[in-house]
Image: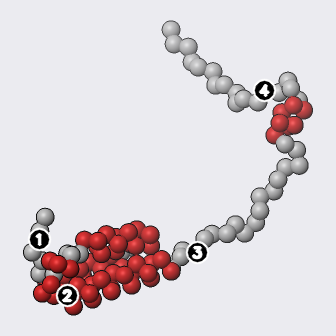
Amino acid sequence: MKVKARVCDLVDILRQVDLVKSSTLLTATQKQTVFQEMLNDLPLEMFSHNFQGTRAVMVAILTQEIKNGSTKSTPKKVPTKAKSVSPKSPKEELLRDPDVNTRRTRTKKAVVN
């Protein structure tokens, strides 16, 4: 575990935030997860007392990205037309003609001598 953190380490997080934001491979939920884990991965305040302002900025940016991701919901696809429902149940259709073979016809296997 790396205890000594530097300001440069925190500034690199800005590049990572831009990379995750612009990624087309991640869904909104996945981006939110990454941002939350980046926020959790920030050094603790006691280890960043020399650059608390920069840490506060990073916390604010990551928190804002997490909130932005949660407010943007993907539009759900709504079916345009309902499926037609048969007036007869499948059980009725099967019982109507009990002599019918309901299974597929079997292909004949070639006999090899």
Circle 4 sits on which residue?
A: 101
Circle 2 sits on which residue?
A: 52
Circle 3 sits on which residue?
A: 75
Q: Secondary structure at mark 3?
A: loop
Q: Are marks 3 and 1 in contact (CB under 8 Å)?
A: no
Say whether disc 1 or disc 2 marks the residue closer to the N-terminus: 1
Q: Position of residue 59 (x, y in %)?
A: 30, 83
Q: CA distance from mark 2 to mark 4?
A: 77 Å
Q: Position of residue 113 (x, y in %)?
A: 50, 8
| Quarter of the image where one finds residue 44 | bottom left
Q: Secondary structure at mark 4?
A: loop
Q: Are marks 4 and 3 in contact (CB under 8 Å)?
A: no
Circle 1 sits on which residue?
A: 3
| Quarter of the image where one finds residue 13 | bottom left
Q: Secondary structure at mark 1?
A: loop
| Residue 73 visible in the snapshot | yes
Label 4 environment density (alpha carbons within 10 Å; few <14, some 14–19, many ≥20): few
Question: Residue flagged by tag 3: what amino acid is it?
Answer: Pro
